[in-house]
Amino acid sequence: MKTFLPNKSTLERKWYIVDAEGQTLGRIATEIAVVLRGKGKPDFTPHLDTGDGVIVINAEKISLSGDKWAQKKYYSHSGYLGSLKEVAAEKLMEKKPTEIIRRAVAGMIPKNRLKKDILLRLRIFVGPEHNLSAQNPESLSF
């Protein structure tokens, strides 16, 4: 019997929809990362992108435990001296509610050449409506 190795012609991608309302950020981000990477599939291969797509709705209704809304900081740096910027989670939620989930999931994907392609299949929306109904997403609950 030969060892099966998936390739683009044998790969089937599904789309899943996740409602983030009332969910804790870290717990939902780990589950999304597993689906995006494809680790729950029987034909998972570490060096290939075998994952599925995920649509997240109600991104503005996510919760953080404890006092993380004020204490958790997000940093960005342009590379120039003195350009380090920090934003609290509360301020980032007001400006870009989708960015908190995107950064949490991106931190859980391995830092390799597949990361960009994996994160392209993560779509995050504010509110309960999305424009990806053509993908026939299945509901995914945790």
Image (cartoon, rainbow, N blue to C red):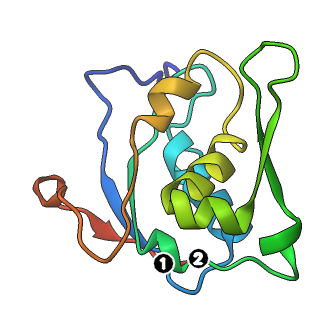
Task: Determine whether 76 is above or below 82 in the image.
Answer: below
Q: Is residue 74 above or below residue 4?
A: below
Label located before the other in sequence (2 or 1): 2
Type of residue at label 2?
Ile
How far from the left and from the top, in percent, is residue 30? 67, 58
Name the quarter where the C terminus is drawn: bottom right
| Residue at image point 68% right, 52% down | 104
Q: Answer above or below: position of 40 versus 28.
A: above
Residue 81: percent from the left, percent from the top?
A: 87, 14
Find the residue positioned furthest to the bottom.
22
**Residue visible at 63% across and 27% down?**
46
Q: What element carries label 2?
A: loop
In what element is the residue under mark 1? loop
Q: Mark 2 points at which residue?
A: 62
The tag on residue 66 is none
The answer to which of 81 and 100 lies nearer the viewer is: 81
Q: Mark 1 points at which residue?
A: 141
Which one is closest to the eye, mark 2 or mark 1? 2
Q: Position of residue 82 (x, y in %)?
A: 87, 22
Q: Which amino acid does label 1 sit on?
A: Ser
Image point 19% across, 55% down: which residue?
132
Please, which residue is most extreme toward the left here?
134
Q: Foreground: 26 or 7?
A: 26
Residues under numbered marks 2 and 1 in contact, where contact means CB atoms less than 8 Å apart = no
- Determine crowd level at label 2: few under 14, some 14-19, many 20+ residues with C-alpha closer than 10 A: many
Which residue is depicted at the point 83% across and 54% down? 73
C-alpha distance separating marks 2 and 1: 14 Å
* Residue 129 sits above or below residue 34 on the image: below
Q: Which quadrant of the structure image shows residue 111?
A: top right
- In this view, which residue lies farthest toward the front? 82
